[in-house]
């Protein structure tokens, strides 16, 4: 799956992450979608390192799972950084 596929998948995953982690992503829908795209790319990168193969197409369950995991990681890091800045 190419970069465009990961972007499309990331937009969908961003909407899911907004519902999975509502307290961590306080930047609105645009922030959630951006974090989903970044998370999908990060998840794909981690998956390619772990599995040493292509991750398949847009309808591959492994690609979806890795995208969601990557987006949750990115949203968690974003939330921690944002909270740290608000505490100052």
Image: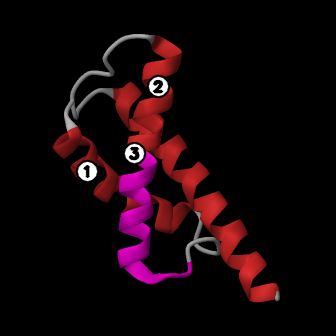
**Which residue is rendered at x = 66% and y = 76% of the image?**
82
Residue 81 - label: none
Q: What percent of the width, then of the height, locates residue 55?
A: 33, 22
Depth order, front residue of 85/70: 85
Q: Is residue 50 above or below residue 15?
A: above
Of callouts 3 and 1, the N-terminal one? 1
Q: What percent of the width, then of the height, locates residue 79?
A: 65, 69
Classed neighbour count for the residue bearing mark 2: other residues with Cα under 10 Å, few (<14), some (14–19), many (≥20): many
Q: Is residue 39 left or right of residue 54?
A: right
Q: List the residue tagged with mark 1.
A: 7
**Quadrant in which residue 5 is drawn:** top left
Classed neighbour count for the residue bearing mark 1: other residues with Cα under 10 Å, few (<14), some (14–19), many (≥20): some
Of callouts 2 and 1, the N-terminal one? 1
Query: Secondary structure beneath disc 2?
Result: helix
Residue segment shown in magenta: 26-39
**Which residue is rendered at x = 50% and y = 29% of the image?**
46
Of callouts 2 and 3, the N-terminal one? 3
Q: Quadrant of the N terminus?
A: top left
Is 74 within the magenta?
A: no
Q: Are marks 2 and 1 in contact (CB under 8 Å)?
A: no
Q: Is residue 19 left or right of residue 15?
A: right
Q: Are marks 3 and 1 in contact (CB under 8 Å)?
A: yes
Q: List the residue tagged with mark 3.
A: 40
Q: Residue furthest top?
A: 52
Mark 3 → mark 1, Cα distance in angstroms: 7 Å
Q: What percent of the width, then of the height, locates residue 2?
A: 19, 34
- Secondary structure mostly seen in the magenta stretch: helix
């Amino acid at each position: 799956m190419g970069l465009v596929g990961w972007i499309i998948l990331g937009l969908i995953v961003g909407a899911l992450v907004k519902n999975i982690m509502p307290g961590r992503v306080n930047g609105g829908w645009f922030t959630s979608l951006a974090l989903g795209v970044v998370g999908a790319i990060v998840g794909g990168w981690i998956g390619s390192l772990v599995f040493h193969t292509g991750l398949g197409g847009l309808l591959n369950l492994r690609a979806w799972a890795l995208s969601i995991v990557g987006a949750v990681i990115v949203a968690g890091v974003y939330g921690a950084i944002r909270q740290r800045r608000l505490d100052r």
